[in-house]
Image (tube, coloured by chain):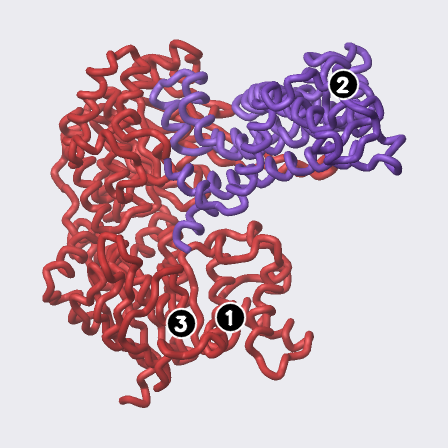
Amino acid sequence: MDTLKAFLRHPTGMIGFVILAAVVALAAAAPALFPDDPWDMIGAPFRPPLSDGLWLGSDMLGRDVAAGIAYGARVSLLIGVVSTLAAVFIGVVIGAIAGYFGDKVDEVMMRVTELFQTIPGFILAILLVTTLGPSLTNVIIAIGSVSWPPLARLTRAEFLRLRGREFVQAAVCQGQPPFAVVLRHILPNAISPIIVTGSLTIATAILIESALSFMGLGDPNLMSWGFMIGASRTVMRQAWWMSVFPGIAILLTLLAINLVGEGLNDTLNPRIARRARTA
Amino acid sequence: MSEDLLLSVENLSVALPPGGDRGFAVEEVSLTVRRNEIVCLVGESGSGKSITAHAVLRLLPPNVAVASGAIRFGGTDIAAADEDTMRGLRGGAISMIFQEPLSALNPLARVGDQIAKAILMHARPRPARAARAARVLELIAAVGLPDPSTLARSYPFQLSGGQRQRIMIAMAMANNPALLLADEPTTALDVTTQKKILMLIRQLQAERGMGVLFITHDFGVVADIADRVVVMRNGRVVEQGTVDAVLRAPKDAYTKALIAAVPGTRPASTASRGITGEPLLSALGLNKTFVTRQGLFRPARRVQAVRDVALSLRPRETVAVVGESGSGKSTLGRIIMRLIEPDAGTVDFDGENFLGLRGRQLRAARRKVQIVFQDPFAALDPRQKVGEAIARGPMAYGAPASEAMADAKRLLARVGLKDSAAGRYPHEFSGGQRQRICIARALALKPVVLVADEAVSALDVSVQAHILALLAELREEMNLAMLFITHDLRVAAEIADRIVVMRYGEIVEQGETQSVFRSPRHAYTRALLDAIPGRRLFAGPGGAASASVMIA
């Protein structure tokens, strides 16, 4: 409860939260605001913003840019959240095992993690999507499998720190089985930085998804911000609105997520939180 | 007389932010420090002694400020001085040393450079590089550190706690301060190191004619170092006077209680507790070496923490393992707890080979050996309610939750807390209360052996006395055998039947408590006994006779 109150008083965090809420509302209301399929041609092509009842204009095939942005928000948020959940799950499990058992297990786990970290994440994602085929599931798998290493390293570091702490040793001496010690004592005390990093991973995931769609590697059945920019890049000089508005959508969403992440960091980090409380 | 007056605090009140449990951290405090004099400010944690000293340099936490009163330093009221003046005073005419030298030093800078920086901040005109370097070496030599030129190039983590505190003192001395504020500078140190640091402070003070305001909670230290004593409680001064007057004839009841709480002032229980029988736990040939790799091409650093240690513990017996930090006593305790696996050796427990147990068998055996850790703040999970922390143990062995919780409440009451404590979180309790919770948690499993790893070292002396008394009662009630690990011989004398003295991982001496105190055989044991603070005023355990033996 205290954390929630502190977050509500965090100015930039709240700005981020408001923007993010607006994006979520837009995604949720997309079918109501734009009953037509965003792929449908509903007007003349190359119409500038605010003409023919099209707020943000139409693209080179006469599709509504505003509808594309609204439906694109659904895809971006879905992929961002689901692939991050996957990355957090993989990262926490691997980091927890490495950090708790240490020694040889840690050695093996960390070499595997480093293997993933040495390959540039985006290139690996492209490789995975081209091999598996461009579908929503495969994009999520690709993004999830390149996003987990930082989370694994973070979890491992937290576990290494907490494993030696006396309250954890006390729980071991009390005869609690390893699984209970991890779930009841170590994880709850390690969760704050994991939440913060996880929230920032959503932003990275959205960016990777946009980049994949920009290159035409997104799910061809789903409207996406990256696809809109990619498709209109050749006519950028004649029709700026086709790429600028989806670009602004990406910028605002990423900014909002980063602000929320920073706000969470400040409120969940006990040292900073205490300073805020006394000030 | 007024020429001599260096610092005078007059009717000082320091306000706390509204909404706290009291309005003022410090109320109407008056005290003076003269040139060439050590004044000890004594009190328990929360008495306002640190706040008083920090107020002098205006190093108060945010939202805490001087509400009224004056702080006169050399005649001017510095409570009203501007920030520039204060910056000039800090580390210049007034320096301060702190309890924890590791957190007060920059971990990434060489200590020599840090001392040089302290000189640069205040010396005008700025001394030349060569002069500065020479001054740094001179200061390091002055605080009694060997090989100053090598030491100046070390980083804080390469030094021991005592060495770091000496470096802090060298930094404080850098600009020849007129007044030194020492905030519990020896509380985090071993007794032997403490003694050396106290002697160093005394010596530097006498050489330079400094005034020293020395904050401590330990009347033993007061007896060793103070010229005058100021006793504080709940933000107010309850008594002040010369050290002899206050210690020999305390007027205030609280002062009397504090003095009585100093371990070793009470006569040790001379009556034999009638401990006989076969050892319950016996360890043989224990060895543990810690290996730290230092990169690919450098040889690994090896530290032999425990060497060929043999130890036995009979039922109901209390054995104290005494030694400085780094003597391997905590490693020994953790080997017996199976928290660290030894390289070699056996532990025979209740007829079983304890080190051979694995998995389920080990978990079953664990409940018979429980531990109380040193730091009650680190030993409790901040996110777990107290009652649950205690009840989880029996529940892990199959006790029904309701029964375990009822038991936990009963135990909380037994260790002197309200049973409503069960529903609260650890941060709501003081250090002493938390240590009681830790004891309750250990005893919830009905162990036969209790390992107390420096269980009272982090506590104020008065709280220490209460916890020791509680442990002494509980061991009779529950027929506990206890392995009491401590660096403080005074504490060991209060509770132990037998004392084992460790140094560099080896046992150098062991024997009945009385005989170790009366006629220590090993030179190191004698050095430990000699380092006990307050020997000038308090006779050691066993009365005056043994005190004279110890002095001889």
Q: Mark 1 = which residue?
A: B142
Quarter of the rendering occupied by the N terminus of chain B: bottom left
Q: Amino acid at mark 1?
A: Ala
Q: Colour of chain A?
A: purple
Instruction: Name the residue at 50% across, 51% down.
Output: B160
Q: Where residue B123 appears, x then y in whole percent?
A: 57, 79
Query: Residue A68 appears in which quarter of the rendering?
Result: top right
Label 2 is placed on what type of residue?
Gly
**How much space separates mark 1 and mark 3, taking CA atoms?**
16 Å
Rendered location of residue B343, percent (x, y): 51, 24
Residue B248 location, quadrant: bottom left
Q: Earlier in the sequence, mark 1 or mark 3?
A: 1
Which residue bears the numbered disc 3? Answer: B180
Query: What is the letter of the red chain?
Result: B
Q: Are marks 3 and 2 in contact (CB under 8 Å)?
A: no
Residue A223 in the image: state x and y as whole percent. 72, 20
Q: Look at discs 1 and 3 and give the one toward the viewer.
A: 3
SS category of the residue bearing label 2? loop
CA separation in Å, label 3 and label 2: 69 Å
Q: Which mark is residue A218?
A: 2
- Residue B383 drawn at (x, y percent): 37, 31
